[in-house]
Amino acid sequence: MKKIMIFMLWLFIGMPVLAHAKEATLTDEYLNNVYSIHTLQDGTTEVYQEAIFRLDGKLAYCLNPSIQAKPGNYLVTEGLSGSYLSDEQKERVEAIGHYGYEYPGHQTTSFYLAAQELIWEYIYGSEVVWNLAPDGSEMEHDVEYEKSEILSLIEKSKQLPSFNQKTIIAYEGEKLFLKDENHAIDQFEILQDGIWIEDNTLMSERLIKDMKIKGKYKKYDNEVTLLYRQEGSQKLATLRLSKLPTFEVDINVIGNSLKIHKVGEVWNGIVNTGEWKNQNGVEFEVYAEEDIMGHFGQIIYQKGELIDKIVTKSGYATTKRLPDGKYKLVETKGKEGYSEIVPIVFEMNDESKKEIEIENYLCTGTLEVTKKAQDGTILPGVTFGLYNKSGKKLDERITDQNGKIVWILPPGEYQVKELKTLEGYVLDTTKKKVTVESGKTASIEQINVPMLPNTSSHKKNHWQFIIGIIGFLISKKLWFVV
């Protein structure tokens, strides 16, 4: 009992539910005065009036010439798995039908007959003659040209592009131009963006990374192989290529990148300490210094063409991979207060240096202070303080023997104040504002005023003299009186 239940369950699950199977209705169009005369391997002949078969409007070919096609409904399945043909036979029969009547430009009765004849000859090995009379007494309907055309297309479909399964070397930024020596590429289509086929050539936009390009044989419609079966009837089939020819080609994108290390001078206050600091946000552009040639006889970049834009991060920036050739690096946006670098010409190849360090020097101007007396006398030894625009003291210096102090400074706003003057001169504590510009000298001429004589000391001496005289006179008078 248990075995019976398992068997029934298998029937329920494993067998197809025919009530939901697809069906198609046969219509036939018998051709007037066209008969197929089959000479079988045993020497006997069979004669049938030829018809063009359609099932629900789809063209079909006969797979069993010795069995009549019955009218009515046929069970429809995709593929030829129910045809009892070997895999090799299925592939060949599909190819014959694919290039038969429905192939572009083949919409003639002769192409239908040619495809049908090739199918019968291939499956059964029988010879077929098309005649205008069932007894073969009339003129033959010759389809040799059409048969040859179908077979030629089948052989051509086996021909793959000459670069199939090859690795192609290309530069980053290069456009692909692969000519097909086998002249088969036009039968294929590419589904990848930026890749296309034109004039027997596989082409691309500028390459940026390794890739595998795949091509698939072009379909002329969206139909698939369908098998039609009915009890007691011959099998019929709508035939298309189930296994489309494909090709692959590997693209290996090469080139060398240039790594840039950008540093700038470090100033501690107003003193250059000899240190360098990584500079972020510095922008560069890379140009072709000469025509840059690729692997396919094409100019990748023309002389003067902009190739790349890069910006430093943590002091570093790296170009895209560059083909062999000569380039120019231009700094387009540097740090404020730093001098612009001269464009750098460099060469890229496998032996060239792949990293360069670029030093940016601070822009500087000169602040000159001159100290004089009112009569023009040079005053050395006077002390001045230098302050930034916020009033922070930066430096303190003393005028030299020429009465001068010279500061080399980054551009900006500064203040100068006299801190200590010479004896006998008035100290000027006023802060004088000055702007220092790159490559220019800002001058301050400070005039010192001499101090007046000390009047309090003169008055004291004067009264002492008067008091002395008065005392002397009084003493004389008193002596005279006495």
Image (cartoon, rainbow, N blue to C red):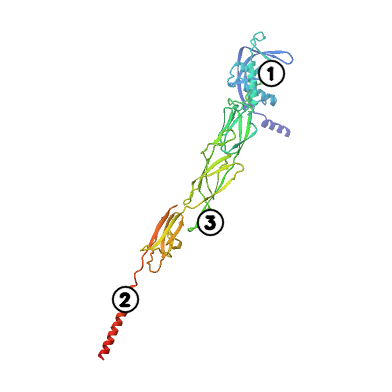
In percent of width and height, residue 372 lies at 39, 62
Q: Spatial distance from mark 3 to mark 1, Cα to Cα?
A: 92 Å
- Front residue (pair 420, 162): 420
Q: State the SS at label 2.
A: helix
Whichever of labels 2 and 3 marks the residue nearer the N terminus, that label is 3
Q: Residue furthest top?
A: 137
Whichever of labels 1 and 2 marks the residue nearer the N terminus, that label is 1
In percent of width and height, residue 51 lies at 62, 15
Q: Which mark is residue 274?
A: 3
Is 220 rendered above or below residue 336?
above
Quadrant of the rendered image containing residue 227: top right
Q: Spatial distance from mark 2 to mark 3, Cα to Cα?
A: 61 Å
Residue identifier under label 1: 121
Q: State the SS at label 3.
A: strand
In this image, 387 relative to 197: left or right?
Answer: left
| 10 Å crowding of disc 1: few (<14), some (14-19), many (20+) | some
In percent of width and height, residue 48 lies at 66, 13
Is 403 rendered above or below residue 124?
below
Is 342 rendered above or below residue 8?
below
Quadrant of the rendered image containing residue 248: top right
Q: Nearer the viewer, mark 2 or mark 3?
A: 2
Is 417 rendered above or below residue 71?
below
Q: Amino acid at mark 2?
A: Lys
In percent of width and height, residue 442 lies at 41, 55
Residue identifier under label 2: 459
